[in-house]
Amino acid sequence: MTILTRLEQWQERGVISPEQHTLLAGLSRGEPFSLFLELNILLYAGILAFVGGLGWTVSTWSEQLGDVLVLAVLSTMLAACFWYCFSRAHAWSTAETPSPNLVLDYVLYLGSLIWSLELAYIENRFHLLSGQWDLYLLGTAGLFFFLAYRFDNRFVLSLALSALAGWFGLIISHWPSHQDETYRRYAVLYSLFVGSTGAILQRRGLKAHFFGTYLNIAANVLFWALLSGVFNREGYGLWFLALLAACGASLAWGIKRRQFSFVAYAAVYGYVGVSSILLRDLNDFTAVLGYFFTTGIGMLILLVQIARRFGREA
């Protein structure tokens, strides 16, 4: 029995989807396949590594090179990146806009990271705002939101939401008596703000395809905030109930919208929260290890089965 025959049988039984059958059959026949996603991730990681190396160079050799040279190099790179993006981009539209070429998105991401690096260098060297990083973060978030919507780039949108999250956190650090409970509530407020903003922009038709990015970031921040409350030794009951409610909502949304990521969020975060409650007073290392071994395998199998079902019904 050939591989193609087996693939046909698996497709008839519903083991694999038609899309998976097409891909696997092509591989078995030696046909070329796309590595675009893998290369895309590697290129973004390479840009991040380059900027990290640039930051190390600046911090290590800034005294020898001098502020003028460092700022001149960074400003030149920043200006070149933004000039290229604005000179090559299509006209702005509220709908999804494809990139004019393969280079623009990477150049935009590089320019955004260089902006952050240069801003951090200026504040560390000259203290223009006397260490008020919340203002820098708020301004950076505004710039990144503008760039993300102007050039239709989800990676820069993620940077904008991250900067906004930092602004939320630094604002609260100025309070004289901040506690973990306050941070937790502020994280919940941030997730609700981001999720509702994404929903409003989607309804207004302003880059509606960005809604998934808003919702994924809001969901993860919310789950982390609720889990931190569940991990408390006292007063965790209300946070545990809130976690279960959030897991239920995430599960319902994922099933209704056919988005496996939200089903996975409900399963993984719910598993961690329930495990925290069950093992709270258990001190037997062997029992704890056995629990995670058996339940972890069960959770993995469950997620694989759900993912396969989503793939068949897609």
Image: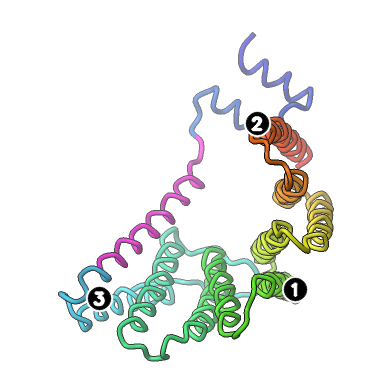
Secondary structure beneath dot 2 equals helix
Secondary structure beneath dot 3 equals helix
Query: Image quadrant of residue 160?
Result: bottom right
Q: Name the residue under label 1.
A: 196
Image x and y of residue 314, in percent: 75, 42
Give the residues drawn in magenta, as a range.
Answer: 33-57
**Residue 92 higher or lower than 249, as above or below:** below
Viewport quadrant of the N terminus: top right
Q: Residue furthest left?
A: 64
Badge 3: residue crowd in 10 Å (few <14, some 14–19, many ≥20):
few
Q: Is residue 245 left or right of residue 192?
A: right
Q: Mark 3 points at which residue?
A: 73
* Amino acid of disc 1: Ser
Pick whichever, 108 or 63, lies toward us.
63
Q: Is residue 212 left or right of residue 28?
A: right
- Secondary structure, magenta segment, majority class: helix
Q: Earlier in the sequence, mark 3 or mark 1?
A: 3
Residue 38 drawn in magenta: yes
- Can residue 199 be seen here? yes
Q: Earlier in the sequence, mark 2 or mark 1?
A: 1
